[in-house]
C-alpha cells in the first residue's frame, strides 16, 4: 500500500510545476520497483503490452575507416550522436539508444549557423522523465561542444501528451540553469551521463 | 538629428573579465557618470553566485573590478538594481532571497535579506522615489516591499495573478505603477488606486492585445514613460504606449496599447531590451548579437522602427542583458553574456 502511495506522490510531484525542486532520491528506487511490478500485472491481464519499454540489442558501432570524417569547419551529426547515445535512461538500466529514445536521425546540424537540433522520443506518452532526459542531453552536450553552439531539444512531434510544455521548459535556459543547481537533480543527471564511466 | 543618416558603429571599449560563470545582468549606478563628476560604476551579477562592482578610473579611463560581493547568495545571482539614490544595491538570487547591500565607500555590506519567495527570485526593481521595491519569482508571484527607516523592509503585497514563472519586474520611471512579464506570455500592470499600497492587476497584455506568443523576458521604458518596449522568446520586440499626461493628471488608470511589432530581425530568443535616454532601443539575443533600433519618423502609418545597426558576435555566446548608461549623451552600453564577460561599448561615428 505504501509503495503505491509513494508512486502516486512521485507522479504528482513530477507532473506539477515543482518537479524541478522536489525530486528525492530515496523515493525513486521504490517507485521504479512498484512501476515494474504494476507492468508485470498489466502484461498478464492485457496480453500484449508496450508499457514496458522495448529494449534493443546494443547496436554495433561503426568503425570509422577515415578518422577525419567531419570537415574542419563543421560538426558531424553522427559525432554528436556518439556523445549522447550512451546516456543512461533515468529509470531503466539501458541507454537512450537501446530504448529507442534516440537514434541517428535524432540529431540534425545547421552548419552555417552552428545550431544543433535534437529530437528524442520518450518511451510512453505520459513519460514523467521526459524533462529529465532533456536535461541529461543538455548537460552532456554542454561539456562536449564548443561554447558558441546553440542546442535546441524537442520531443518528437506527437510522442508526448504535454509536448509543448516539455519543449518550452527544455528550451528556457534560465529554467534549465535553475534546475541544474538543484543537487538532487544534478546527481541524477550526472549518474545518467557518466554511467558508462563508472 | 537623424541617426540613420550618420554612419554609426558599436565600438568595444573594454572587456571586463572576472566572473567564473555566465553573467546574467548588469546595472549602471544612476548617480555616477562623467557628467556628475563621479566615476561611472557598474554592477554585474553571475551564475558564480557573486556580484562584481566595476569602476572606471578617471585617469586611465580603464575599468577595474572594485569589489566582489560574495558569501551571501548561495546560488546564481540573477539580477541586480541600484536604488535611485545610488546608495543601495538590491540583488535577486536563485537561492530565493533578495539581498540589499549598502555602499560604505570602499566596501559593500549586506544590510538586509528579503525572504518569502518559494523558489528562485528572478528580478528586482526600485520605484522612482526609492520607497518601494518589487521582486518576482518562479513561484509565479510578484512581491512589493515597502522601504522603511533603519534598513527595514516590509512586505506590502503578494500579487499572484501570473500563471507561470515571472521573469522580470519593472517600475514605471515616473509613476508608482508596476509592470511584470512572464513565462505565461503576458505582461501585467499593477496599480494602486488610492496610492495606499493596495496594488491590483489593472491590465494584462496578452496575445489578444497583439501581445507576445511566448515567454516575455524583459520590459524597458523610454525616458518620458509614455512608451515601453518588451522582448520575447517569440523573437519579436513590441512597442506599447499610453496617454501618460492623462494618467499623471487624473485619478484613473489609462490602459496601454500595442503600437508596433519589430519582427524578422532576430532568429533566436531576445533576452533583453533597453531604451536609451536619446531614444535608441538596444536588444541582446541568443544569437550572440546586439542590435540597435531607432524610430524611423516615417509617421505615415503610426509608429515604425528601423534597424540602426547589428553587432554580430558581440559576445562568444548569448547576450543576456544590455543596459545603456545613465549619463546624458555618452552613449555607453554595457552587455552581459553566457561567455562570462561584461563588455562596455560606445556608439560612435565610423571614421
Image (cartoon, rainbow, N blue to C red):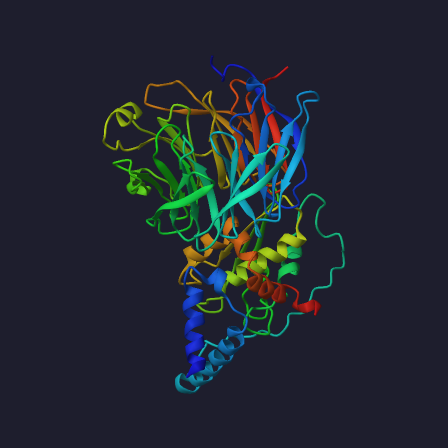
Q: Is residue A87 above or below residue B244?
A: below
Which one is in front, A136 or B77? B77
Residue drawn at x 51%, y 80% as measured from the top left: A33
List the single residue furthest toward the bottom: A44
Q: Is residue B310 above or below residue A190?
A: above
Q: Position of residue B106 (x, y in %)?
A: 64, 33
Which one is in front, B120 or B86? B86
List the single residue furthest toward the front: B150
Residue drawn at x 42%, y 64% as measured from the top left: A15
Picture quadrant where residue A26 is located: bottom right
Which one is in front, B86 or A92? B86
Specify whether B51 is left or right of B118. right
Q: Position of residue A160 (x, y in %)?
A: 43, 63
- Whether residue B106 can be seen here: yes
- Whether residue A87 can be seen here: no
Specify whether B236 is left or right of A91. left
Q: Position of residue B280 (x, y in %)?
A: 47, 24
Specify whether B131 is left or right of B318. left
Picture quadrant where residue B147 is located: top left
Q: Position of residue B42 (x, y in %)?
A: 58, 32
Residue drawn at x 63%, y 52% as measured from the top left: A142
Q: Is residue B254 above or below residue A166?
A: above
Amino acid at each position: 500500500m505504501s509503495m503505491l502511495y509513494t508512486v502516486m506522490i512521485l507522479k504528482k510531484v513530477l507532473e506539477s510545476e515543482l518537479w524541478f525542486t522536489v525530486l528525492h532520491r530515496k523515493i525513486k528506487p521504490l517507485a521504479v520497483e512498484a512501476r515494474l511490478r504494476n507492468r508485470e500485472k498489466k502484461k498478464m491481464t492485457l496480453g500484449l503490452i508496450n508499457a514496458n519499454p522495448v529494449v534493443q540489442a546494443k547496436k554495433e558501432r561503426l568503425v570509422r575507416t577515415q578518422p577525419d570524417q567531419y570537415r574542419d569547419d563543421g560538426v558531424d551529426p553522427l559525432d554528436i550522436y556518439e556523445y549522447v547515445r550512451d546516456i543512461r535512461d533515468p529509470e531503466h538500466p539501458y541507454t537512450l539508444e537501446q530504448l529507442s529514445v534516440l537514434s541517428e536521425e535524432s540529431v540534425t546540424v545547421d552548419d552555417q549557423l552552428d545550431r544543433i537540433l535534437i529530437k528524442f522520443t520518450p518511451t510512453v506518452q505520459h513519460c514523467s522523465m521526459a524533462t529529465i532526459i532533456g536535461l541529461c542531453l543538455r548537460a552532456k552536450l554542454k561539456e562536449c561542444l564548443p561554447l558558441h553552439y546553440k542546442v535546441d531539444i524537442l520531443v518528437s512531434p506527437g510522442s508526448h501528451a504535454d509536448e509543448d510544455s516539455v519543449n518550452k521548459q527544455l528550451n528556457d535556459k534560465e529554467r534549465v540553469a535553475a534546475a541544474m543547481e538543484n543537487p538532487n537533480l544534478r546527481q541524477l543527471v550526472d549518474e545518467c551521463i557518466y554511467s558508462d564511466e563508472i | 538629428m537623424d541617426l540613420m543618416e550618420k554612419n554609426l558603429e558599436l565600438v568595444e571599449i573594454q572587456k571586463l573579465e572576472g566572473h567564473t560563470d555566465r553573467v546574467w545582468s548588469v546595472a549602471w549606478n544612476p548617480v555616477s557618470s562623467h557628467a556628475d563628476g563621479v566615476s561611472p560604476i557598474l554592477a554585474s551579477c553571475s551564475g558564480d553566485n557573486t556580484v562584481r562592482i566595476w569602476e572606471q578610473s578617471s585617469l586611465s579611463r580603464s575599468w577595474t573590478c572594485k569589489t566582489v560581493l560574495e558569501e551571501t547568495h548561495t546560488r546564481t545571482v540573477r539580477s541586480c538594481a541600484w536604488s535611485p539614490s545610488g546608495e543601495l544595491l538590491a540583488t535577486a538570487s536563485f537561492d530565493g532571497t533578495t539581498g540589499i547591500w549598502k555602499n560604505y565607500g570602499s566596501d559593500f555590506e549586506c544590510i538586509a535579506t528579503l525572504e518569502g519567495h518559494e523558489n528562485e527570485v528572478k528580478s528586482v526593481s526600485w520605484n522612482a522615489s526609492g520607497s518601494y521595491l518589487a521582486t518576482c519569482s518562479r513561484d509565479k508571484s510578484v512581491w512589493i516591499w515597502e522601504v522603511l527607516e533603519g534598513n527595514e523592509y516590509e512586505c506590502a503585497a503578494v500579487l499572484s495573478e501570473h500563471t507561470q514563472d515571472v521573469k522580470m519586474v519593472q517600475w514605471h520611471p515616473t509613476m508608482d505603477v508596476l509592470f511584470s512579464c512572464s513565462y505565461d506570455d503576458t505582461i501585467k500592470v499593477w496599480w494602486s488606486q488610492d496610492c495606499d499600497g493596495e496594488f491590483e492587476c489593472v491590465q494584462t497584455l496578452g496575445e489578444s492585445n497583439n501581445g507576445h506568443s511566448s515567454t516575455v523576458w524583459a520590459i524597458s521604458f523610454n525616458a518620458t514613460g509614455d512608451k515601453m518596449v518588451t522582448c520575447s522568446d517569440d523573437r519579436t520586440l513590441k512597442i506599447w504606449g499610453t496617454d501618460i499626461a492623462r494618467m499623471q493628471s487624473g485619478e484613473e488608470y489609462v490602459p496601454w496599447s500595442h503600437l508596433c511589432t519589430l519582427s524578422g530581425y532576430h532568429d533566436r530568443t531576445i533576452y533583453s531590451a533597453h531604451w536609451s535616454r536619446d531614444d535608441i532601443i538596444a536588444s541582446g539575443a541568443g544569437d550572440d548579437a546586439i542590435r540597435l533600433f531607432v524610430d524611423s519618423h516615417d509617421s505615415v502609418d503610426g509608429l515604425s522602427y528601423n534597424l540602426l545597426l547589428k553587432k554580430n558576435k558581440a559576445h562568444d555566446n548569448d547576450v543576456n542583458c544590455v543596459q545603456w548608461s545613465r549619463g546624458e549623451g555618452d552613449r555607453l552600453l554595457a552587455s552581459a553574456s553566457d561567455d562570462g564577460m561584461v563588455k562596455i561599448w560606445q556608439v560612435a561615428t565610423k571614421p
